Image (tube, helix red, strand yellow):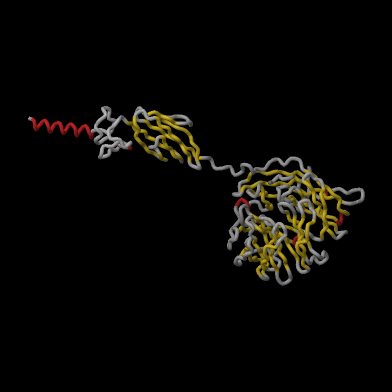
Amino acid sequence: MRHLSLIVATALITACGTASSSPSLDGGTGSGGPGVDGGGRPDGGGPDGGSGGGTSFRLDVSTSGSGTVRSSPPGIDCGGACSARFDQGTKISLSAAPGDDSTFGGWNGACTGAGDCTVTVTSDLAVAATFTQKPPPDECAGIAATDPGAPVVFRTAVGRPESSYCLPGTSNGAGFLALHTSNVDTQSERFWFVRSDGAPSRSWDGLIPQMFYELDGFFAVDVTNRSSGVGYKLLRFARDGELLETVESGSQGVGVGGNDPLGGIFVNHARAADGDLSSYDDAGRLRFRVPVPTMSSFVVDRLGNALVLSAHGADNHKLTGQWIDHEGKAGPELQALDGLPDSWRLGLYPRVGGGIFVHVSTTTNGGADVVKREWVRQFDSLATTGSPPPAWLASRPDTKIHMARNGSAYAMLSLPNMKETPDCAQRLEIVSASGKSCGTATFFVARGACQSGSLDVGYDGTVIQQLPREMETTDSSGNATCTWRFWPGYAH
């Protein structure tokens, strides 16, 4: 009988150690006690490494969405589902950290609401955390078109109506405008430098000048012989229109300029046999000079890289291209455009972030009439192949582009009405970098029909509108006026 008693006792002890993973209420011996996630350890230790043990309970945590829950004291650290055991009476704080694309929606179970979650362990507990994905960012936030309000007006007398012309204007980054007039009688063209409040600052007379804005001034490229249109000179102006210096001049060929978004100007010198593309910084210092085909068109993208396009030999229906980076390194020749019409006009416009868009107008009657306009190509910066324009751009063929909202969006501008239209108004649509329309501002000219002039945007986002010629007046001396209306900084 004594031998039988020993066998029974051993069996009872073994059963007590393995029968359950629930908390031991009698203190137990620690042999085969439960561990993390309800599992046991062969050495009998609990989750806290203890060997003999008080009462512990299980805390289950689950999450939905993108985020993580952590506990203090440690034990819970997961996104998804996890659990741990804690001693009875332990006070546990849970914190929820949403992912970058989510927000914390709140707790369920042992905790509720969206505030702090603190529980005291007295039994098994379950807590669920919900993370909600953020809505996609509003591309139009902070850039949408707004009511332009009342314009500032500048008007000046030019010359006899039959021999004077009002031309588009621009503005620099310092709040000054350069407004362009031409007078055949005096064989000169004048730029009026005007403050943003409409007060005149200075004027400057050139021959056939092109004016380019800068952050703190202007550059102009002019000819040296008006009658032949030959020869060129590059001039630099202060912000208020004061002529600072003639940077360079040449007696052969012509010069065509283009703004450098990184500061300064590019000039294409075209001569009878050859040409070059030169880059100058904003102080007029030469950066580099690179040979390019004569009579090329070019544009500088937002990264400071220039794409030069030129006719493919004698074939007027093809254009080849070449990138010149901002350090003056020339890339390989690329096939840019093919299948151009017999008579065309090219427009090159920078894209947000880098690269360019290409616009082609089909013309007749010696270029006087436009019969078709279309966006035909786009190029990534320094890319040797192009691609079709995005659908949002192709659907707006009768527009031109200027950067808006500090270079983060596009200002899509109405082109001048070559013929009278019943709606005497011009429009500027703000379009996000991805092509989402962020609203349109209407710049009314007058009631009724009219043939509108140019609508342009300057460096600082000033919108500049020419008054239609038929709406100009004649002063007591018989001189016609030129009038510009402008909205300082509107598209900035």
Q: How many marks?
A: 0
Image coordinates of residue 191 in percent, x first then y, are: 81, 54
Asked if 32 appears above or below 295 in the picture, the reply is above
Residue 305 occupies quadrant: bottom right
Query: Quadrant of residue 263 in the image?
Result: bottom right
Image check: 423 left or right of 32?
right
Q: Is residue 444 left or right of residue 13?
A: right
Farthest residue, direction bottom: 273
The answer to whether 197 appears left or right of 356 in the picture is: right
Check the picture and name the quadrant holding the N terminus: top left
Image location of residue 301, percent across then percent down? 64, 57
Image quadrant assignment for residue 270: bottom right
Q: Is residue 385 left or right of residue 91?
A: right
Q: Nearer the viewer, residue 368 or 63?
A: 63
Q: Is residue 141 above or below residue 316?
A: above
The residue depicted at 48 percent of the width and 34 percent of the height is 105
Q: Residue furthest right?
A: 477
The x, y position of residue 132, in whole percent, is 49, 38
Q: Nearer the viewer, residue 121 or 469?
A: 121
The answer to whether 172 is drawn above or below residue 88 in the figure is: below
Is residue 419 something one can see in this rendering? no
